[in-house]
Every structure is written in C-alpha cells, then in structure tokens.
Amino acid sequence: MLNNKNKNIKTLPLRSAYKTKRGVMLIGSAENILRSPLIKKYIKKTQLIFTSPPFPLNRKKKYGNLQGEDYIKWFSEFAPIFRKLLKRNGSIVIEMGNAWHPGKPIMSTLALKALLAFLESGNFYLCQQFVSYNPSKLPGPAQWVNIDRCRVKDSYTHIWWMSPGPYPKADNRKILKKYSNAMINLLSSKKYNAGKRPSEHKIGKISFLRDNKGAIPSNVLTFSNTTSNDDYLNYCRKNKFRPHPARMPLGLAQFFIKFLTNPKDLIIDPFAGSNTTGAVSEDLKRQWISIESDVNYVRSSYGRFKKDKK
C-alpha cells in the first residue's frame, strides 16, 4: 500500500494502488484484472485502449517478456477481451518494437505474426500504421551495430491503430502541427501552382491556400525521450526506486489521446509500466484505468502525479 500525502490521490484496498480525480492504478496481471469483476462495469464503455505491452524479444528483459509462439498465443488472447471493453467507435493503439534472432544479424517476424494473430482473434480492422522514431536512441542491436558494424541502429517502434469498426472516433484537427516557414510564406503570398506534377497528377481547383491553423501530421512521429529531470525521475531518485527501463514518451501518448478521444472518455492501459498513459490522460481531462503487475513500477509511477513545487 502506498503512503500518499497528496490529498488528490488516495490509497485503495485489494488490487488498487492509488487513484486520482480521474483515474486509478491497479496492481496485478492484465490477464487476471481484465477478466475480474473490477472491470465488468467498463464493458462497452472504453473509448481507447492505449498500451505498450512487453515487446516480443528473443531474450529475457527485467520488465518481463514472453518468447516465440508463447508470445503470439499470450498476446492474441487479449484481443477478444479488448473488443468486449471497447465502444463501437473505440480504438486500440499498441506500440510494438522490433525483434531480432539471437546470435544472428537478422530480424524476427515475431512481432508481425503476433499482430496478425491479434487482429484475427479480435476481428479488428487495421486503421493505420505509425512509426515512432527516436533520433536519440542508443545504437542497437549492439553486437551487429557497434561491434561487427554490419547493421545500422534500430531507432523506431511500430504503432498499430486498430478498431472494432472501420470508422472509429478520430479527428486530426486536434493534433495539427505548426506550419513550416515555407507554408507560412505560401499562405502570405496567396500564390500556388495548381498545375500538373511530375507524377502527372493535376491538383486542379483544390486549394492549399486556406489557413487551417496548422499542418496535418504524418504517420511518422518523432520523440527523443531523453528527459533526465522530470517529476517521475526526480521522484524515483528521491525515493530510491528503479525507473522503468522502457518508458513511453509523453508526446506519443498525448498524440493518440488527443487524436482519438475527447475529455471524459475512458482510456485503459493494461501494461502501464511507469503509467505515462494515466498521467497524460489526467492532464487532458480523460478518465483512465492503468494496470501494472510489477509493484516497484507501480510505486514509482506515483511520481508522475506528485508534482514538485519549485
């Protein structure tokens, strides 16, 4: 049980670690909790399941992961559970890293097989694929990139957006980017060449001179994730907690939560880790439920809600 002094966060009995004004962190395995009476009242009421499960690696990590066919079976069994929780216009967004064969400089197709098994098991539509690029990621796999120098560094993860139906709730006007200087100059000049392109495509009467207050982002997202002095890490240092080694960038959670949900919508993260999803949902005024089986990560995640006063 956490000893919380923050009045906005209360300890709860049984499997619950702490709660905030908008959400709750639950301790235990996702398999057990998502099948328990604790979750029954959220069936068909969840707008977004947003998570980064243990990656399908070919060697064990401290934060836990299954391997090979065991991973595929384990992962795909969540699909019907997730479908049961989602609203008809809800979404699932899952981050998955790449897997490599042990002892060989070749990639594994395990992540793709797991994704296909998940889609089939849940009868989900694949809405869009995203890439989350980390330009500051350390070179790896180390043997093939740093030592043998026969591969380049693996610096991105896949983000898979799925849904029970082909038209989930989504609005890209909520995630617009700042216009580039070139676009700002174009809007100012009010001149645009609408003629044929090298591809023979003719723009015609479609106008790119309308100011839409921002540019539509692409499906390649860039987040460095190099923060070393935020509330979470400061809390871990102060209380001698081991930080989660695979923390999700805040920007990644913000992008999809803004894109696919509205304030007061419910978001569930079954593999919460350091609870990035819960913290971002709280800030964006969404309801949230996070689940994590490692008590140390649960305890340290409380630091995301305990803001340092300077």
Image: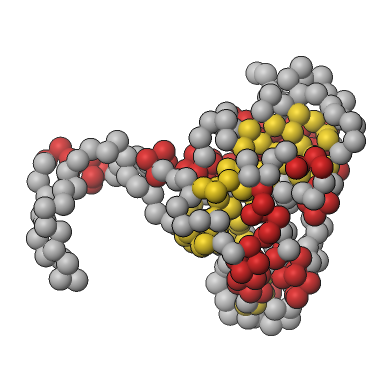
- 267 or 64: nearer the eye? 267
- Please state the horizontal and vertical placement of residue 141, each as a whole percent of the image: 66, 70
Q: How is the image coloured?
A: secondary structure
Q: Position of residue 52 (x, y in %)?
A: 66, 54
Could you tell me which residue is drawn at 66 percent across and 36 percent down?
288
* 147 sits left or right of 89 in the view: right
Residue 179 visible in the picture? yes
Q: Is residue 83 above or below residue 275?
A: below
- The image quarter containing residue 115 is bottom right
Q: At 57% across and 76% down in the image, what residue appears?
A: 151
Q: Is residue 215 above or below residue 234?
A: below
Q: Nearer the viewer, residue 72 or 132?
A: 72
Q: Position of residue 229 (x, y in %)?
A: 65, 35
Q: Is residue 217 left or right of residue 12?
A: left
| Figure quadrant of the C terminus | top right
Taking the image as shown, residue 238 lies to the left or right of residue 217, namely right
Is any atom of residue 29 visible in this view? no
**Residue at x 73%, y 81% (from the top left corner):** 103
Q: Residue at position x 69%, y 82% from top?
A: 104
- Quarter of the picture containing the N terminus is top right
Residue 90 on image: x %, y %: 55, 47
Q: State the count of labels.
A: 0
